[in-house]
Amino acid sequence: MTSVPRGAHPELRVRLAADTSSVPGARRFVVDGLLQWGREHLVDDAGLCVTEMAANSALHSGSPYLHVRLRDLEPAVRVSVEDAGGMVPLAAVGPPPVTSQGTTGRGLAIVSVLAESWGVEERGDGRRVWAHLAGDGVEHAVRPPVVEHGEGTPPEPVVLPAGWARVSLLRCPVQLALQIDQRLDDLVRELQLIDSAAGPTPPRELGRLIEQLVTRPAFARHLGRRTALDAAAAGLEHVDIEMTLPREMAALVRELLAADNLADEISETHQLLTARSTPEMVSLRTWFAHSIVSQAEDDAAPVAYEDWLLARSS
């Protein structure tokens, strides 16, 4: 196999909402990037490290967004997570407990053990935590991070793995989008709690289905929600929402639309407390699904909501 020149691959970058729901998305992003680069031997260590770094940012930074980067340092890689929060508390780094039950609770100590080196860069606009992974199989002693100081820099363009897509929802009505998002949360909660009667579409089963469809692409949904909340706080009526997700998840969006429509059909039959969607809500969520599916699967150009409505009416 021909060796790859150092730094031959472009740095991959993605922005996610600083929410715990984004942690699986951060891990998936790094894993997909490494597989694209032919670095399968780094997947486990890098996946664990970015999981801990993204969780730390989501839980402690107070930042609305976090940025994940994967840089090629052939034969090693550098994984980093940065946010615009204040001084993120780095818990006292001690030996991680010995357990085979996941990584929750081990904190950034696991980064110290797995990384050849790791550190924290305090910046004028936040903080970046990074890990240099050599993939040599060596477990290192628990060490404090290398602390650096740097100037703040403007956000850089998103660069995604080959199997990911960037989706733009142009001129999205802010308040209507937030109503749809809240209704979806309410619907899942109610359908899971209800004792369903026998029938072809029991609400409880529908609740489980909708929850599964919402949970898997949750990191993309929460990025859209965060953008809409920021726009609402700024008093905007419309906003452009950009999301990133693996292309395969477009199929889940299509299924979610069908499940949401089905929930509307049975809402009165089963006397749900969650109100049936208004025609405006149905229209907007249909545009959501069409935009995500067409852009992720076919690389279609984004169409603003008003233009989409005009095209449908004609």
Image: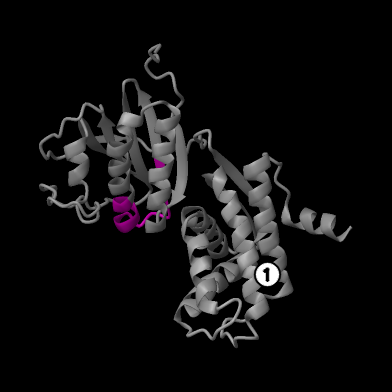
Identified at 37% across, 57% down, the residue is 20
Q: Is residue 223 left or right of residue 24?
A: right
Judge by depth and name the residue closer to the eye, 298 or 19. Answer: 298
Q: Position of residue 302 (x, y in %)?
A: 70, 46
Instruction: Name the colour scheme.
Output: one colour
Judge by depth and name the residue closer to the eye, 87 or 314. Answer: 314
Q: SS at mark 1?
A: helix
In the rendered image, residue 189 lying in the magenta stretch gets the answer no
Identified at 31% across, 21% down, the residue is 75
Q: Position of residue 120 (x, y in %)?
A: 25, 39
Q: Position of residue 153 (x, y in %)?
A: 42, 36
Q: Is residue 232 left or right of residue 123?
A: right
Q: Position of residue 176 (x, y in %)?
A: 64, 68
Above-or-below relation of 190 to 31: below
Q: Quadrant of residue 284?
A: bottom right
Residue under numbered circle 1: 281
Q: Residue furthest bottom?
A: 271
Amino acid type, residue under disc 1 in the picture? Met
Q: Is residue 257 left or right of residue 79?
A: right
Q: Is residue 244 visible?
A: yes
Q: Residue furthest top?
A: 2
Q: Is residue 276 visible?
A: no
Q: Which residues are magenta?
A: 55-68
Above-or-below relation of 236 to 279: above
